[in-house]
Image (cartoon, rainbow, N blue to C red):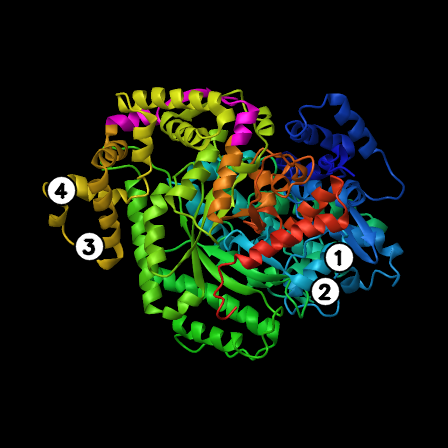
Amino acid sequence: MAEQEASITSLLCTLLISDARVLQQAWRTPFHKPQPWPEWRHEVYVAYHPWAARYPDHVFDTAWRAFSTPSHGNSGYLIKSLFALVDDYLELRHGEIYVKRDRFSAWQQSLISRISFLPVRAAAIIRFSSELWWGTPDHYDQISGIKNGGAPWANECVQMLRPYDLAIDDYVSREGLHETHLHLNGTTHAEVCWLRALNEPNAETKDFNKAWTDHKKKRQVRELVALINPSLTPAELNKQLRVAKTLRAWLIAAATNTVTPQALLPVSCAKICDSPEDSLAPDPLGLALNLSKSAIIANEAKWQYLLIQRLTHSPSVQLERMFHCYLLLQNQYYRLLVQSESHYGFDQFQKFTLTELREPAEDDYLHRFQAIHGHRLPTSRVKYLEGRFAPKKSVDELSQLLYKILNGYRKYLTQATSTHQAPPPFGANLAWVLSELEKILLSKQVSDRSVHRLALVVHFIKEPWSPSRSAPYRFHALEHKLRQNTGALLSTLKLWPRLSMWIRGIDGAANELHAPPDCFASIFRVCRRAGITHCSFHAGEDFPHLLSGIRYIFDTLELLNMREGDRLGHGTAMGIHPSLWIDRMPQRISINRGDWLLSVLAGWILLRNIPECASATEKLRLEVEQTACFIFGKNISPAELERAMALRHLSAHEVSRMMSAESEFSTIEPLNDIWQAEANLVYLAHKEDKSAVELLWQWQSDQRLWERSESLTQKDAAFLDEASYIKLQQALMLRVKARGVVIETLPSSNVRISQYIGFHEHHALRWMKVAPHAIDGDPEIMVALGSDDPGIFASDIESEFHHLFAAMRNLGLSESDALQKLAVINERGRIYRFHDRRIQ
């Protein structure tokens, strides 16, 4: 079976319940008015065209005609759409609902990246109920997968649907998965955020409103919103949440048969908004469904199931229209939190992190640890977890954040192990929670697989740099911020020494086009000296040119002095097949000259000792000389440039202090112990190769040079031929192998951000030497698995495992061979974890 894209029918169904144009029409139309298929055609067609522009109109016409043909039964358009999605994606196996294996990629990339799957799953329970051996749909808890042995939080978490693969289920239950790359902010699933937003619309949109007006964020936030709904504003979103809250209450009442015949249902969304007192809904907390005040996921799934069941057997135009509007409002909100295949690349990914819509739900960390554990006891599906968080600028802010994270983990541990949970004492602080965690982890209740073991990784953020006359050197503001955050981190560790058991590594995250690894080299060394000896770094994830992506990885290895046991996040540029990248990029690419200079320099260094690459090496050498001459205004040999650029790991702050001193280095004011070693490195480099340091300083500080280096030039995507690109990747792989560095591969993240259209193209298959991806000459490198931002990608670590397994099975590997390759990757995560091995 080959991995398939979304069918045209499922695309139409998805757009019908998610697109802003459809919402606009549904918003103003009275609920009692039937809307036959022809009334939706225009909106759906306009929404469909950008997704499937490569198809002629007759493809849409025939799909629409087939889809809109009256079917047996009396169900309306919405219910028919939900059942069509069930038929396309889902199947029943041994009494449980699964995603069809060959549809799993399309399920995640095309469906649940745009809409919540809860109503589709509810429709599936009804569709398959006649096939279930226990017979009646009254056994909802059994049908929906919440069975005996469930964790106490099972009803509160999103239960992702996956393919039926007994081999994976058996492996995960026996071995557990090892999550090496997960950002704690970005983990909560959008359905959880939605329910919180309905409870408190004002609180939930407060941060969004700030992001909408913040001068640093508003352009990106408004661009994202405009792509989803050009008419949406914070005020409009707040209004929509209030309407959705009212609709939900009425729909719950209808689902539980508690709406009296005399009740006056709302007239339309517009009327609810204009006259909320005329649409007062019943209190859903007092209904037979027995809803929780916190509006948990199980409640949402159950009332949708009951409502779809009612509309299937007793169609109601008014109720179906109300349900349709509710789903449209939910899915518009959903699309502000989840990156779909229409939002490509890291720049667009980052916009989802800037809206602040996740902030209220992610203020409490307990839910994330519960979701990572899974829905069943006594074992966690994840054995080792590394959660990443951004540091703060002060000890107070950082200690408060760490208290929230670790107290959330403490609560999770007590729930998972049924340990007595005493409430935090008045004034509970970081010292208290660290002590409590030690007690729990050393107790007999915590067995090997009863919980996932946590380690924390501090990810410093890459931020862009804009040349200005006030800046003394490149990335001056970023280096100042990194030093400040590092100082706060190390001071916090000094105040609470027990934190060293939990904070186990450092990382550089965010958009790699914004800042290079050399900005982080100094703080990485400082952290290592302070005892944080593990490091990771995002590199080769998104890049303007393949040569640039390769250079980002090369610089990360060399400038950060990565060594055995360190890890590199993504590494896409080192694995993507060059022909695929060239085919899917413009023939000519605009890139700034400074980036291009460093990229061709790295290429020349990597290829110069490979005899069969002599022609490519010479081309790169000439490009280095020409570009360097333009930027520096003088002739510079590649060897001179190499010596200077190899010193970019030095602290620019300390280089600045030394170069501005009027006399000997020893006359500069002394530094504290944390940074003195950095100053010494600059002194030694200047002593050994003064000309190289001076050339480096010219690169860092000369404002006229900045202008030339930031100017754009156009270069061919195929600047080198395919064979030379492959040799370049392989030379880089050899360096990764020689250093003993592990690559964190993140399938869903890479498919959304890179040039791939599906998991069957992912570069991890090349690294695992899966035909036809395997390339002669590729050295063996070590790979681990992570999920990155599972909430933003509508995924989790087990789904990532399934995606690679399904890709290999669809490429012809046997079940045992595919699982064996994945087991090696999972083992790498265990062996090269950052956890404190004295206690974990």
Do labels 3 and 4 touch, CB within 8 Å?
no
Q: Position of residue 638 (x, y in %)?
A: 34, 27
Amino acid type indicated by mark 1: Ala
Nearer the camera: disc 4 or disc 2: 4
Whole-angstrom CA distance, mark 3 to mark 1, is 69 Å
The image quarter containing residue 2 is top right
Nearer the camera: disc 1 or disc 4: 4
Q: Within 10 angstroms of label 1, few (less than 14), some, or many (20 or more) residues?
A: many
Do labels 4 and 2 touch, CB within 8 Å?
no
Q: Secondary structure at mark 4?
A: loop
Residues in magenta?
Answer: 704-727
Number of marks drawn: 4
Please tell me whether residue 726 belongs to the stretch shown in magenta: yes
Residue behind mark 1: 255
Nearer the camera: disc 3 or disc 1: 3
Residue behind mark 4: 661
Q: Residue at x 61, y 76 (%)?
A: 418
Work out whether 106 lies above or below 63. Answer: below
Residue behind mark 3: 671
Amino acid type indicated by mark 4: Ala
Q: Earlier in the sequence, mark 3 or mark 4?
A: 4
Which is nearer the eye, 66 or 770?
770
Q: Earlier in the sequence, mark 2 or mark 3?
A: 2
- Quarter in which the N terminus is drawn: top right
Q: Secondary structure at mark 2?
A: loop
Residue behind mark 2: 289
Q: Position of residue 686 (x, y in %)?
A: 21, 41
Work out whether 548 lies above or below 314. Answer: above
Do labels 2 and 1 touch, CB within 8 Å?
yes
Amino acid type indicated by mark 2: Leu
Amino acid type indicated by mark 3: Leu
